[in-house]
Amino acid sequence: MPTLAPLLPASLQPDFSQLIDSVTDSPGSPWKTLFPYASQQVIDAISLPQRLITLSMNDWATGVAFIESTLSSLAQPPSSCFLNSYGQLELFGEATLEDQALVLSPGAILQQQNGILGISLPPLLENPQLWYQVKGYLLSGQLRWHDAYGAKHIKKIKLPSGEKPNCKMILLGSRSQFAELNQLDPEFSALSQQFAEIADEAKVTADSISAILAFVTQQAAVADITEISAQAKNKLLQHLSAIRDHQHYVQLNASYLTKLFSYCRYRFGKELTPAAIADFILTQQQSMKLPQHYSDESIAELQIPITLEGKAIGQVNGLSVVELDGHPIEFGEVFRVTAAEYLGDGEVIDVERKAEMAGNIHSKAMMIVESYLSQVFGKEEHVPFSANIVFEQSYSHTDGDSAAVATYVALISALSQMCVRQDVAMTGSMDQAGNVLAVGGINEKVAAIYRTAQLKQLTHPVIVLIPQSNLVNLSCDDALVNAVKQKQLVIYPIEHVEEAINLAIGDVEQVYETIRTRIKELNGQDEAEASWLKKLMRCWQA
């Protein structure tokens, strides 16, 4: 097995500086470059007879920016209006009686004659009756004054039949919201409509970098940011890459960028600098780290005994991501996986599953671990061991497969009775061939082991093992990059679970041979006992 090499600091976060320096011009419409097909769908919809355009996206402000930018690229852009919060009055207008005279106040649909009206989907989900009124207009093209607010209370005067405003409607919502609308009205998907979809992310390439920076500049202008240095652009893209958890992608969320730019403008003025972005990131993290603080405190006070020194049999430091309901961010946490072996029939008992504290994905991962263990040791001889697997001090529902590698290493340590290094932590899923697979939250997990090492004031480096396939997801902060430079933290990417054994226990062939020797000895003892029993039975029969 080839010798593993630790990661270099440069591989821990992306560097977009060369791409930024290569930009010489700014595209007129960045969205045409980032999402050309979606832009063309919106443009085509203006000339096509369909009255409805459905735009699937996650952020309202991003969707509005996309539509406005796309429309502005036309030679004669139509008028447009966008409503995020509305009701019957705002859409269909109002019908009232004043001194026995009928007064009709037009709503947004009528006001946007021959134009574009963009509306968010959630108000229609909250008021199904309003959706069916909108659907009536989409099907007939006629706006009935009977649908106006207050029309049902007018009895003595006949309402006008209605008008045909030729207003195109763009319905903005997420995939889950459109799925909910389809459940509410199964005929929704049958409506004649143009469909477009945009993501709140973009891949950073030589072809897309100018469009990405143009979008960033547009959003900065909204917050009155007039100057962005090249270093600030790189810092910003690194931050947006960290949010996306991918070195080749950045998040493009207009609402989030407005929040970031508004803070930097308020604190540091019209020029955006790397220091201003760093201050924003730190402020956000500090304001939302109370649950993480309590977790760290329990480790510092030894209420949760995490050991990062010495060696132990059947005990491995795993890494998890904590998600809390109602809390906007996730954070990483170190936990202990322990394995205890005893004479048995080769079964691996997952205590979390037995206690009904584990989800289906976790259960599947534990069965894969057991399957691979059987493939390694159960093909030639019966395995006379069983083992219990416990996630120590786990008091809530557990799910996910990222602890599979740690579980397997803990099992191997217990079966071989060979110690595991406690200055090593690991994360990774695995398949039935022992290959290590990618997991989520890799940046939070790497940060967790370094944070724990700081809490314990260690003077030696700590080692973390991550899946090789997760390298593209690394986007660590400057503190972690510096820790790797100072060799306080050493990160090894692994492709097979045996590499984890090599690093955490010792030479894998020697470890496996120790287990096989124990299996043979116990199986030989069983055979001797069986032979003695047969002799006793023959004597008794005689």
Image: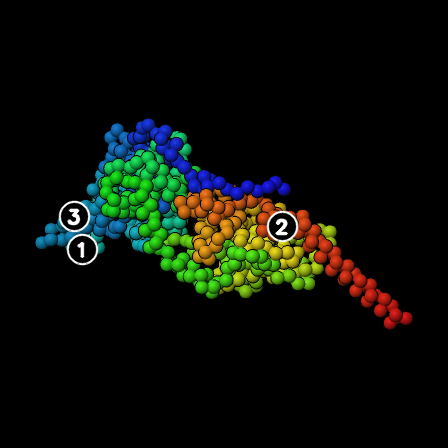
Please state the horizontal and vertical placement of residue 88, each as a whole percent of the image: 24, 51
Categorize mark 1 by other alpha carbons within 10 Å: few (<14), some (14-19), many (20+). Answer: few
Please state the horizontal and vertical placement of residue 84, each as a whole percent of the image: 27, 48
Amino acid bearing label 2: Gly
| Label 1: element kind | loop
Q: Which residue is mark 2?
A: 506
| Label 3: element kind | strand
| Label 2: element kind | loop
Categorize mark 3 by other alpha carbons within 10 Å: few (<14), some (14-19), many (20+). Answer: some
Residue 127 quadrant:
bottom left
Amino acid bearing label 1: Lys
User: Residue at 82% across / 63% down in the picture?
Assistant: 531
The mark nearer the N terminus, 1 or 2, is 1
Left or right: 178 as drawn, with respect to 94: right
**392 or 531, which is in the foreground?**
392
**335 or 174, which is in the foreground?**
335
Residue 255 quadrant:
top left
Q: Which residue is mark 1?
A: 155
Spot the residue most to the right.
542
Which disc number belongs to residue 104?
3
* Pair 1/3: label in front: 3
Categorize mark 2 by other alpha carbons within 10 Å: few (<14), some (14-19), many (20+). Answer: some
* Residue 16 shows in the view: yes
